[in-house]
Amino acid sequence: MVTNTTLNIALQNQSNSSNVYAYITGLALDNNNQRVLIQADGRTPYYPTSPDSVGSPLAMDCGIPLGHPGSTAIINIPRIAGGRIWFCMNDRLTFLLNPGPGLVEPSVSNPSDPNYSKNWGFCEFTFNDFQLFANISYVDFVSIPISMTLTNEAGGSQHISGLPANGLQTICNNLVAQNNVDGAGWNKLIVNTINGQPLRALSPNTAHVMDSSLFAGYFDPYVNAVWNQYSSQSLTIDTQAQWGTLSGKVQNGLLTFPGIGNFGKPSTEDIFSCSTGPFGASLNNTAAMGALTARISAGFNRSMLLVSANQPTADFGAYYGTRPTNFYAKIVHGANLDGRGYAFPYDDVAASNASGGDQAGTVFDGAPKLFTVAVGGVNAST
């Protein structure tokens, strides 16, 4: 079965603002993977050409107005890979072009970015000839609430609840409370407006980009305990792929999976990023090492590697149960109405027999009819 060549998306303003804009970006799959944005009318694709200089403005208005609170804007998109639906409250976002063309997207880690002090967020999607796949991403930061509902041609639906209207405030309160307990620096993830109100909460990985001293050595005692435990027993990883179940032990200081590869001790930065140090791309057995990396780094973030020698586990309730752990991920999940949303790069890792849905907050279907995305958190529900 092949999807339709276009998809209707209902963008709902579930905030208290009448000044909300949406932006759609990605790569046009049916047009040679060209970079594409959707224009302000909500249906005309804009394929930017390469500008002569860096930081050039877009040639078209791509801010889609959502109207007054409670209103819905129906837009139509072509098949898009690597797509994002961006929302900005009480302002417009600035996208720029570099030669290529390369799209300069809004940044929360660059204080000189023209969007840095604005209130914005996004969800991610890919709509190809096979399916629509979408998720709520908190990998970089949390800001305005976003929820998603996917309805298919048969009338079935999937729903990701997202945050309530006061979700960011709850997250910030809990980050402060956790910092009061351990003094690790969780309060430094909070970015406030000039009026002292929470604007966003950064993930530890994003915050580390801005302050390399943050969380220095935080996971070291846990890593040492993991290395000690698996020096005398095996760590068993279900790759959930063609490599099946693999077992490894610490040998000569390296967590070694015979015939596949090995991992050195990760730093705290490596654990939060899931992509540096021993979790960076392997030159050998790349795909197999990637499967191991995803499950081991998830086990570190959730502090599950000392709980069970068999990973990944199905016990969501045990995640983040011991210190040190990724309290950002724990707090973000706790604030979401259904507990779901991508809080670190491999938050989609789960045991094959896990029940009760996933942690990552994804929807997907091979016959999508309507994709509804609501911003603001008013009327948010499970």
Image (spheres, rainbow, N blue to C red):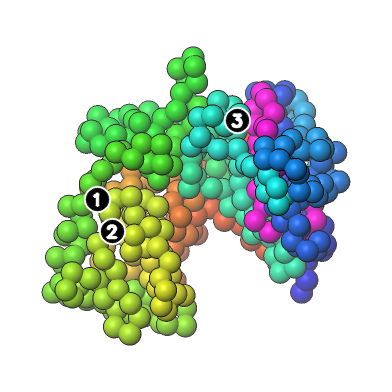
Decide: marks 1, 2 in contact (CB < 8 A)? yes
Instruction: State how far apart marks 2 and 3 are (Cα).
Output: 33 Å
Tell me the residue at 62%/41% (across/down).
Answer: 105
Instruction: State how far apart marks 1 and 3 are (Cα).
Output: 33 Å
Q: Which residues are magenta?
A: 75-97
Which residue in the protein does label 1 denote? 219
Which quadrant of the figure contains the C terminus? top right
Kindly tell me whether residue 376 is visible in this rendering.
Answer: no
Image side of residue 176 versus residue 106, left or right: left
Q: Is residue 108 above or below residue 371?
A: above
Image side of residue 257 versus residue 55, left or right: left
Which residue in the protein does label 3 denote? 115
Instruction: State how far apart marks 1 and 2 are (Cα).
Output: 9 Å
Q: Which mark is residue 266?
A: 2
Kindly tell me whether residue 292 is visible in this rendering.
Answer: yes
Tell me the residue at 20%/72% (across/down).
Answer: 250
Judged by its main secondary structure, the magenta piece is strand
Q: Is residue 315 magenta?
A: no
Which quadrant of the figure contains the N terminus? bottom right
What is the crowding at mark 2: few (fewer than 14 residues within 10 Å), some, or many (at least 20)? many
Is label 1 or label 2 in front? 2
